[in-house]
Amino acid sequence: MQAGIYLDNAATTCIDKRVLETMLPYFYDFYGNASSLHTLGTEAKEILERSRLQIAACIGARPDEVIFTSGGTEANNFALKGVAFAQKSKRKHIIISSIEHDCILNTCKWLEEQGFFITYLPVDTDGIVDLNVLQRTISDQTILVSVMHANNEIGTIQPIKEIGTICKKYNTIFHSDACQSFGKIPINVSEGYIDMLTVNSHKIYGPKGVGALYLRRGVNIVPLLHGGGQEEGYRSSTENIPGIVGFAKAAELAASEMDDENYRLTALRNKLTAFLYNNFDNVYINGHNQKRLPGHLSFSFHGLEGETIRLLLLLDEMGIAVSAGSACSSNHGNSASHVLQAIGLNPFEARGAIRVSMGRFTTESEIDSFQQSLKFKVLQLNSIFSQ
């Protein structure tokens, strides 16, 4: 679909050519193992630490608090399992939101089997965590709270600082999955009282297969991987230098271009929102109208929720790529979204969301084309209310 319209940037982005150019020398010219003591190894170590500094600068962290991983899923597993097992002899209570990514939910299901107790925080109809419930359920027995910064399906941004403040009061570790928000909206681990933060590369025009966990100094955690003791013993495995270099460059570009991109993408999102309301009487938006990621819009057509997959395929035939909720959740078939059910949709409605996620290379003319194609294709669908 080279010449198509790509509106699924929340699932993954293409590699920015500037990122690719930065990576290329580290596949061939500077290919050393960062643990080796010879010149090629020390050169790799230098670029590894330079990249660590670049990532740390984007979130207000110290370089030695950034641990490189294979991506967001590994970092989230490391954060939750590592802290849980470091504390298991003292505390066994964990709190997460009900709209977390599958890798958090499934990690917690596994931790429940190991004897830990999980509280799932409800959210309101916009997808915002109920802080009152957090206040009532957190205690000095709570090991950690994990709430994602911005939701991957509906784009809603959580009140991270308020959550961090509550956790700090109870001396509870606060983790946030920022895979969708990193590089798109500002985040500072100190200002948000964040103890652990998951970030990754392929959502910000960097390579797949690389991410990082911010781990505040002093947080007690058990390694997930054991081996040669790389990453200061926190994550054994030979570091992916080309991927890390690309990740760092992608983060640097995202940070430097963030303000202009946010303004542009918010304008495109608002344009699409206005079009939907002006052209469809049965449309409804999922998530918060304002507290959402700049280029992210989730919407459904009342009565047409059962036709969502067909609509996606019709659009795909026209060279337009959009998503039905989370790309990861699509592995489970046409099951109802746990996120949409958490914000109050019934199981039928929770199968019917269209997720449009715009990005760096999305143009206004592409949005115009998408709007007209959507209007045309929706007419081909069959409402459950039609006679």
Image (cartoon, rainbow, N blue to C red):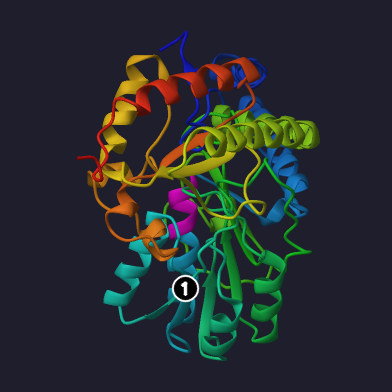
Is residue 152 depicted above or below 387 in this figure? Answer: below
Q: Quadrant of residue 39?
A: top right
Tag 1: amino acid: Pro
> Where, quadrant-wise, is the C terminus in this rendering?
top left
User: Residue at 38% across / 14% down in the picture?
Assistant: 318
Tell me if residue 71 is in the magenta stretch: yes
Is residue 5 depicted above or below 34 in this figure? Answer: above
Q: Position of residue 47 (x, y in %)?
A: 69, 32
Q: Position of residue 350 (x, y in %)?
A: 34, 53
Q: Is residue 13 visible from the viewing direction of this image?
A: yes
Which residue in the rendered view is the most extreme toward the front? 387
User: Residue at 36% across / 29% down in the picture?
Assistant: 378
Q: Which residue is mark 1?
A: 122
Q: Position of residue 118 (x, y in %)?
A: 40, 78
> Where, quadrant-wise, is the N terminus in this rendering?
top left
Q: Position of residue 29 (x, y in %)?
A: 60, 14
Dot 1: few (<14), some (14–19), or many (≥20) neighbours within 10 Å? some
Task: Indicate left or right for 274 with 383 as reference.
Answer: right
Nearest the eye: 351 or 166: 351
Per the rendered image, the range of residues in magenta is 70-77
